[in-house]
Image (cartoon, rainbow, N blue to C red):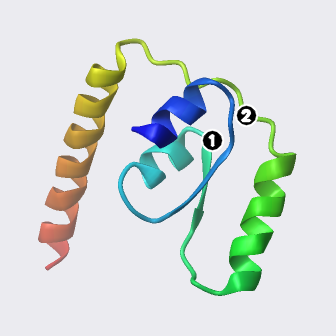
Amino acid sequence: MAAVEAAMVCVPVVMSDTGCATWLADRGQTLVVRSNEPERIADAFERAIAMHVEPLRLSTTPEDAARQQVEWWKSLRGHVEEKL
């Protein structure tokens, strides 16, 4: 929830590939780091500082946004299960 709140007030977010990271990245709100290499993490922070982030506009409340994320995750689970 903290990442969504940060995105709502134009704070760039750097996060690992967990939780709502991909959902926010799809909306241009976050940088997702898929590495534990210090150089890559530092690079992501440097890029985040230079990012121009538009405020995340939720057409609903934060609670509804959380519900949308859960539905999005469920749809991804279906795609993964199809591949297995």
Where does the N terminus fall, quadrant-wise?
A: top left
User: Taking 10 as reference, is 15 left or right?
Assistant: left
Name which residue lies at 58% across and 33% down. Answer: 7
- Residue 34, compared with residue 74, is above or below; it is below
Name which residue lies at 14% across and 68% down. Answer: 82
Q: What residue is pinned by disc 1?
A: 28
Name which residue lies at 42% across and 12% down. Answer: 59
How many numbered discs sit on the rendered protein?
2
Q: Which mark is drawn over residue 53?
A: 2
Real-space Cα separation, disc 2 to disc 1, in angstroms: 7 Å
- Mark 2: which amino acid? Val
Mark 2 or 1: in front is 2
Give how far across and how far down residue 20 sits, in percent. Answer: 39, 48
User: Taking 19 as reference, is 78 left or right?
Assistant: left
Give how far across and how far down residue 64 sits, in percent. Answer: 27, 21
Give how far across and how far down residue 77 sits, in percent. Answer: 18, 59
Where does the C terminus fall, quadrant-wise?
A: bottom left
Sequence order check, earlier mark of 2 and 1: 1
Please tell me how crowded label 1 is: few (under 14), some (14-19), or many (20+) other residues with Cα within 10 Å.
some
Give how far across and how far down residue 48 sits, in percent. Answer: 76, 52
Provide the secondary structure element on which disc 2 rests.
loop
- Residue 66, compared with residue 42, is above or below; it is above
Q: Does the CB distance between marks 2 and 1 fall below 8 Å?
A: yes
Name which residue lies at 76% across and 83% down. Answer: 39
The residue lying toward the viewer, choosing from 79 and 15, is 15
- Residue 40, compared with residue 66, is above or below; it is below
For the view shown, which residue lies furthest in the right direction? 50
For the view shown, which residue lies furthest in the bottom direction? 37
Provide the secondary structure element on which disc 1 rests.
loop
Splitting the image into 4 quarters, where does residue 63 fall?
top left
- Mark 1: which amino acid? Gly
Please tell me how crowded label 2 is: few (under 14), some (14-19), or many (20+) other residues with Cα within 10 Å.
some
